[in-house]
Image (tube, helix red, strand yellow):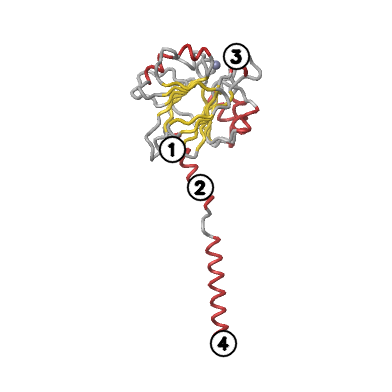
């Protein structure tokens, strides 16, 4: 009888130890969060900024099982460039965003161009024979295993980018991360529906949102990392990026890549 009580006590102690040990195991949620942060940083490592909204990113560090996708957004100001693009994204036809000479520098036979469907874009791109996808807000396309959501980009208190022109921004899903590239836009109500991990946003004002408005847009989109673009050229000053960083404060990690 005494032995039986001893056995029950030992079993109870063992059960208690197992419960405590189990509680101390990291949850799968913790593991996922760690992976998520690293993936975002790995994407940011591949960012190059050529001034204005001219950006180069890659999925090289994230998309390990596929071949690398080199992506350029609104390429201008490239100077001497020693690589070609897999995908070129164009948000609208204004000359500081769409320059067919710069696009030509990036082409290889397999380069795909994704562009706003406005007629001006179609005209400017007509001499390029590569595959083209003309898109409008609300479209979703898949290229080389990358999911691309086409989103709105327009002014709400200026005349330069009317909503009815169907200019666009892009949200590209790289690995598990959503990377938002704004195009020329103000802070618009749709942004509250876009939860993104990395956001490239214009900050110069005049034709787009100002640095303080962009900082609020970052909160709307819950962007974990944010990168100011479209400043220091037409229009704006080099200081716009730093102002944006101050306005954002603790709400997001602001990354200002050196100009390439
Ligand atoms: Zn514009």
Q: In the rendered image of this protein, does residue 159 appear above or below residue 29?
A: above
Sequence-first disc among 1 and 3:
1
Q: Which residue is mark 1?
A: 42
Residues packed near mark 2 inside 10 Å, few (<14), some (14 to 19) or many (20 plus): few
Q: CA distance from mark 1 to mark 3?
A: 35 Å
Checking the image for residue 2, the label placed there is 4
| Label 4: which secondary element | helix
Q: Quadrant of the N terminus?
A: bottom right
Sequence-first disc among 2 and 1:
2
| Label 3: which secondary element | loop
Q: Which residue is mark 3?
A: 160
Q: Position of residue 141 (x, y in %)?
A: 50, 29
Q: Is mark 3 within 8 Å of ligand 1?
A: yes
Q: Quadrant of the C terminus?
A: top left
| Label 1: which secondary element | helix
Of badges 1 and 4, the one in the foreground is 4
Q: Position of residue 235 (x, y in %)?
A: 54, 15
């Amino acid at each position: 009888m005494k032995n039986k009580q001893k056995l029950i006590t030992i079993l109870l102690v063992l059960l208690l130890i197992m419960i405590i040990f189990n509680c101390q195991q990291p949850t799968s949620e913790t593991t996922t969060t760690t992976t998520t942060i690293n993936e975002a940083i790995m994407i940011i490592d591949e960012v190059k900024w050529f001034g204005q909204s001219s950006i180069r990113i890659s999925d090289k560090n994230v998309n390990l099982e596929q071949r690398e996708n080199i992506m350029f957004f609104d390429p201008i100001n490239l100077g001497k460039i020693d690589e070609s693009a897999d995908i070129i994204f164009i948000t609208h036809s204004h000359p500081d965003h769409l320059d067919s000479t710069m696009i030509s520098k990036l082409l290889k036979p397999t380069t795909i161009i994704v562009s706003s469907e406005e007629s001006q874009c179609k005209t400017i791109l007509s001499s390029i024979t590569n595959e083209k996808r003309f898109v409008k807000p609300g479209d979703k396309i898949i290229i080389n295993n990358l999911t691309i959501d086409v989103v709105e980009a327009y002014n709400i208190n200026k005349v330069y980018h009317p909503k009815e022109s169907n200019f666009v921004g892009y949200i590209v899903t790289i690995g598990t991360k959503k990377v938002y590239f704004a195009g020329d836009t103000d802070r618009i109500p749709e942004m509250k529906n876009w939860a993104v991990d990395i956001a490239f946003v214009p900050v110069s004002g005049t034709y787009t949102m100002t640095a303080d408005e962009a900082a609020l847009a970052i909160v709307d989109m819950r962007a974990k990392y944010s990168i100011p673009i479209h400043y220091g050229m037409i229009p704006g000053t080099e200081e716009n990026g730093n102002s944006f960083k101050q306005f954002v404060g603790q709400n997001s990690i602001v990354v200002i890549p050196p100009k390439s």
